[in-house]
Amino acid sequence: MSWILIAALCYMAWSAMAVLDKLVIMKHLKRPETLAAIIGLNGFLALLIVPFTGLRILEPMQMLLAIISGVTFTLFLVPYMMGLKREEATRAMIVVQLTPIFVLLLAFLTINERLTAIHLAGFAFLLASGLIVSVKPGSGLKLSKAFWLIILADIITAVSIVTAKAVYSSSALIDVFIWIRLSAAAAGAAMLLIPQYREDIASTLIKTGAWIKSLYAAKMLADFAALFALGYVLTKAPATLVNALGHSIFPIGVLLVSVLLLRIYPKAVFEEFSRKAIAVKAAAISLVVVGILLINA
């Protein structure tokens, strides 16, 4: 199976999970950044596969990279959520879509990742798709405090992806995956040392019913599986292209999930369905198709 298809399926799944987070979890959290701890703690699921695979120690430098990748995976959500509280979502999403540029630069400078001319063209199409689908007429872009918080989140995300690529390229897939996930879980657990986050999670558990807990447990398992699949993808493809593909697919996935929810739960839909909005999203999908064709060339 092509790495492009696997990566696209992963990001489509995460778009559905993002809608679930918005519908089920975020409305119960007093502090949106608490979501970082919840997502990070999901990494403890890696302990379930250790009895079958063993827990091998990586080389010192590889271990350091795995730890950095896992910790930054959890912590990027903190400045992002803090920024989102201070800024309109539409403006915030424009800044988030700049992440592939940071990945491109960091991968070029640190792991000597080089793209061919045709792959750079595909990267440009994917980046353009993510940007135009995130722009809302009149939203504009201003350099507020939120802007710099979200830029920080972009940089942290780039560090997580590039370090993951570096260690996946030099060590066994399953060993790297386990250590990255356990590092992410350790970062989530460390956040629980802060009383506000600990109380927020406890309060959310009390407020949510059994079916919501079951639904979120299934979401955590799906997230865990998607992260493993993405680790495999990073052994096969440049981090820059994987991230650019993800940032172009994700908003389209949110759109598709919103369409599916339209009749079931109209209030849950966060997408605009005017003719102009649909035209913009159709153009974004066209750019994605072109971008995929180019990076697959």
Image: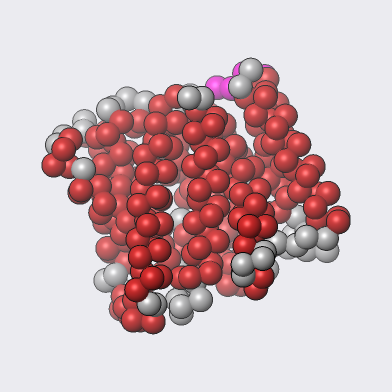
- Is residue 122 inside the magenta stretch? no
Give the answer, above or below, for where 1 lies relative to 277: above
Please identify the quarter of the rendering in which residue 91 is found. Answer: bottom right
Q: Judge whether residue 208 can be spotted in this image.
A: yes
Residue 167 location (% of width, % of height): 34, 32
Residue 71: x and y, percent?
A: 34, 51
Report the residue at 50% width, 50% height from top. Answer: 14
Could you tell whether 90 is left or right of 115 in the image? right
Asked where in the image residue 159 lies, by quadrant, the reply is: top left
Specify how the rendered protein is coloured: secondary structure
- Left or right of 292? Residue 62 is left
Taking the magenta stretch, the answer to whether it contains residue 114 is yes
Between residue 108 and residue 222, name the one nearer to us: 222
Give the residue drawn at x 17%, y 35%.
53
Q: Which residues are magenta?
A: 113-117
What quarter of the picture does the C terminus occupy?
A: top right
The image shows a total of numbered marks equal to 0
Magenta-highlighted stretch: main secondary structure? loop
Residue in the foreground of this view, choosing between 261 and 144: 261
| Residue 89 visible (yes or no) | no
Q: Position of residue 228 (x, y in %)?
A: 36, 39
Query: In this picture, is 204 found above or below 92?
Result: below
Q: Residue furthest right?
A: 275
Q: Residue at x 78, y 44 (%)?
A: 282
Residue name at image x 27 percent, y 63 percent = 189
